[in-house]
Amino acid sequence: MGFVMYLILLVMGYLLGSIPTGLIVVRLVKGKDIRKIESGRTGATNTLRAAGFWAGFLTWITDVMKAAAAVWITRAVMPGNYLLEALVALAAILGHNYSIFLFEKTPEGKWRGRGGAGGAPCIGGMLAFWPPSLLIIIPVGGFILYFIGYASVGTLSVAVMATLILGWRAAVGISAWEYLVYGIGSIVLLGWALRPNLIRLFQGTERIVGFRARKSKN
């Protein structure tokens, strides 16, 4: 029964993460398919480009809550199982990045999942694990995004900060070491989803945003 419940909760986390919020919001607000706009991702950043600030903000909040809700449900069903909480939160990020509702066949005949890059649900996991972490992750991530000027770097910094915070809390004895699985796993998942952006970054062709983008226009 324990294994079955583990499996049910992991699938629940993946399905919650798979809800394509950005696709739904842009469709309702603009009547467009976000997969055909800019990066084609369904996360908050591309939603903002496709439908404006409030659409992007709504998408971001909802994507954060998908992962947080998955952890809260797991904690209520199987309290004290920190490793399962970490795995369910990772399942939510996986669902967000590769939604079961957005699998499609490529022109080459291969199947691929569509979704976001995982930044918002990564924050959602941290909201469930330790809510005050958002007071660090959001402003520091926003600073990196605005002044360094790369959305990919800002997004990946969320996972890096999550890992550092969880590692520090475990080291001083106020958090479970099992949560580090979430931090390391989130770096892998976000890094994999962002690999086209990171390649462009190293090639010097990645789009700049924020302060540097505004400065370059002046």
Image (tube, grey):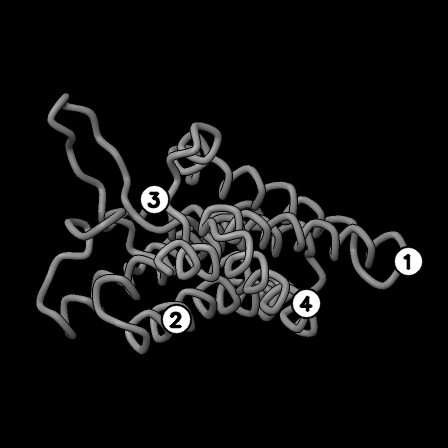
Q: Is residue 86 above or below residue 174?
A: above
Q: Which residue is mark 4?
A: 136
In this view, the residue farthest toward the bottom is 54
Q: CA distance from mark 1 to mark 2?
A: 32 Å
Q: For the residues labelled 2 and 4, say whether their Cβ atoms are less than 8 Å apart.
A: no
Kindly identify the amino acid type of the residue bearing the numbered disc 4: Ile
How many C-alpha atoms fall within 10 Å of the one at disc 4: few (<14), some, or many (≥20)? few
Kindly identify the amino acid type of the residue bearing the numbered disc 1: Val
Question: Can you tell which mark lies on residue 201?
Answer: none
> Which mark lies nearer to you, 4 or 3?
4
How many C-alpha atoms fall within 10 Å of the one at disc 1: few (<14), some, or many (≥20)? few
Q: Earlier in the sequence, mark 2 or mark 4?
A: 2
Residue 192 point in image, percent of width and height: 46, 35
Q: Which residue is mark 1?
A: 172
Kindly identify the amino acid type of the residue bearing the numbered disc 3: Tyr
Question: Can you tell which mark lies on residue 62?
Answer: 2
Q: Earlier in the sequence, mark 1 or mark 2?
A: 2
Q: Earlier in the sequence, mark 2 or mark 3?
A: 2
Q: Earlier in the sequence, mark 3 or mark 1?
A: 3
